[in-house]
């Protein structure tokens, strides 16, 4: 099994990461491509071309790939991918395309949420956990959830869409309408929240312009606007983690995605906020931690899914 | 198996229901006792005495009970019961007491939330569902949740405590602080909400006094206060169901408990409210239904858990 090579692909809304790993999780190759506005079959062609290249390269090195795992930003139904961030991917036949390009190697496609939690269980801070949540805050917000040791997918692989969770209105501002978690507490939402708070509380002429969540997080200690924005997000992230704690009574909640990173320093504040709301017994029992696999969670999880597929196929063979 | 007799006990905060069922779910005996303010070991003694009586009665009738299942309002840890509504039941040794009273018959204890979903899967509207939720709105609010065909319990059996979910403040009134779902949208909370809304909107001197959720539901068509209260609950119930839909992508959400019943007529309004918030694909895929087992959900679920225990013990014997 040491010589096993898995090609793992982590497809996002703007880029695709490729890696070749062995069964111990050691990475032997990696590459990264920007989608650069591609849509529909253009994205498929890009993935197929890079896949062919890598498979060829690995064969030449006498370490051929034996299975492929792919993480996609959406949901998978019988090999067809729904990925709302990629135009034209309502039911994209990715499994078929990759299998054709790979001479019918075993290929498995899972949602990024599924891959995050599988990856963190395999190589990160969720090892040996059966009831554990990976809360991913990036451009969007989603959760990979393990219940009784199995991934929660729901009936059409759309489970874990917690960016849609209802949250109270921002404390600042006139608006009293509830919001969706992802609306203002995600990588794409945080700069919007800055402009909402600027309008109601700050002098618009002199207020600094923030283009990214990371800029706001960096300015937390020096700019009152940045502090107001991030403090509001801490409340929402805390409430979200409280809801998940009450619902799942998990062993751990792991925070990751593009925003954590930089926001990892706020974990103690988020935990404190969550304590105000969560079921008190469950609140004492869970651990809140930053992801250890970080930006590699998707790649690790895709590889883990591929390894599991191979091992289930081998079991099938032994039985027959 | 037709001659199998199971004693099922559904313990609540104020009463205990007993039933003897066969493996087909047919009820052959039932009784009901009020706890009448009992606490600690007094509650245990009441359960033990009635259990002894029923076991004796069934032996005399030549249809002896072969296993006992118990639903409790809280959580179970290794046979010890935590039931916050029963004073003195922080870690009550119920399994041991009932086993002693029952000459070491097989006994299983599960939380009421677990029993509700098991009961509805066995005898109600959740048959053949693997991803399904029983949302119980009674004195409190909780959920029995099936993920991949298995009950979500969490690491200490406290999962499904959705009464703690964070909700936006009531639309009426001065308060802008978020609330917990159970605070105002439960059987015990609904009359409180009436008094909160009375204070802010209605003439306190002439406003009718409501003592129960059922009274308010009954007055929905005739009294504007009752309508304001229940409309607010419909919003919160809709948001809750939306959150559960986005998180679990379930096949069905079943509403039951003491409040549904009477509130079942509001299901279409609740569904409409949920549609505003839930992940849209999941929102189209799930069905919202009233419980078919109604007040028997706990009894059916306790019996089902006992039948499963017996069948797993028999399997164990066959293997040895």
Image (cartoon, coloured by chain):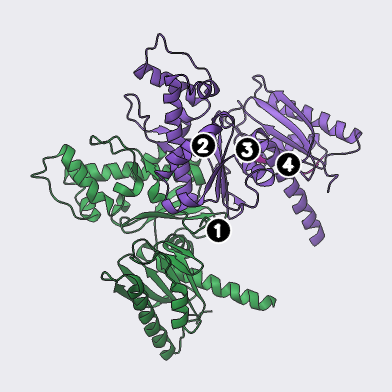
Chain colours: A green, B purple
Q: Which mark is residue B303?
A: 4
| Quadrant, the N terminus of chain A | bottom right
Residue in the image at 74% along x and 48% along y: B309
- Mark 3: which secondary structure? helix
Q: Mark 2 vs mark 3: give the one in front.
A: 2
Instruction: Report helix, strand or loop for mark 1.
Output: strand
- On what subunit does the disc labeled 4 rest? B
Q: Is residue B34 above or below residue B3?
A: above
**Label placed on residue A150:** 1
Q: Are marks 3 and 1 on the same chain?
A: no
- Are callouts 4 and 1 both on one chain? no
Front residue of A127 and A303: A303
Magenta-colored stretch includes residue B106: yes
Q: Which mark is residue A312?
A: none
Of all chains, the one bearing label 2 is: B
Residues packed near mark 4 inside 10 Å, few (<14), some (14 to 19) or many (20 plus): many
Q: Residue at x 24, y 53 (%)?
A: A213
Mark 4 touches mark 2? (CB < 8 Å): no
């Amino acid at each position: 099994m040491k010589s096993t090579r898995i090609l793992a692909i982590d497809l996002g809304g703007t880029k695709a990461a490729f890696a070749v790993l062995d069964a111990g999780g050691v990475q032997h190759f990696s590459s990264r491509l920007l989608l650069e506005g591609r849509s529909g079959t253009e994205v498929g062609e890009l993935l197929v071309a890079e896949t062919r290249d890598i498979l060829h390269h690995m064969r030449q090195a006498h370490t051929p790939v034996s299975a492929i795992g792919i993480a996609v930003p959406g949901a998978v139904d019988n090999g067809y991918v729904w990925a709302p961030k990629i135009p034209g991917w309502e039911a994209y036949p990715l499994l078929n395309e990759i299998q054709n390009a790979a001479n019918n190697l075993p290929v498995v496609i899972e949602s990024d949420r599924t891959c995050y939690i599988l990856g963190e269980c395999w190589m990160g801070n969720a090892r040996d956990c059966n009831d554990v949540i990976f809360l991913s805050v990036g451009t969007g917000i989603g959760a990979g959830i393990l219940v009784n040791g199995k991934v929660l997918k729901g009936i059409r692989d759309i489970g874990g869409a917690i960016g849609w969770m209802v949250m109270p209105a921002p404390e600042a501002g006139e608006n009293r309408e509830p919001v969706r978690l992802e609306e203002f507490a995600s990588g794409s939402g945080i700069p919007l929240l800055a402009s909402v708070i600027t309008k109601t509380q700050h002098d618009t002429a002199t207020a600094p312009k923030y283009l990214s969540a990371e800029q706001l997080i960096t300015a937390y200690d020096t700019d009152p606007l940045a502090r107001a924005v991030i403090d509001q997000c801490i409340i929402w992230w805390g409430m979200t983690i409280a809801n998940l704690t009450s619902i799942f009574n998990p062993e751990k909640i792991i925070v990751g995605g593009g925003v954590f990173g930089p926001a990892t320093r706020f974990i103690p504040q988020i935990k404190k906020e969550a304590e105000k709301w969560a079921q008190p017994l469950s609140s004492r029992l869970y651990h809140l931690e930053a992801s250890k696999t970080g930006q590699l969670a998707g790649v690790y999880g895709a590889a883990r899914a591929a390894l599991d597929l191979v091992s289930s196929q081998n079991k099938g063979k032994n039985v027959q």
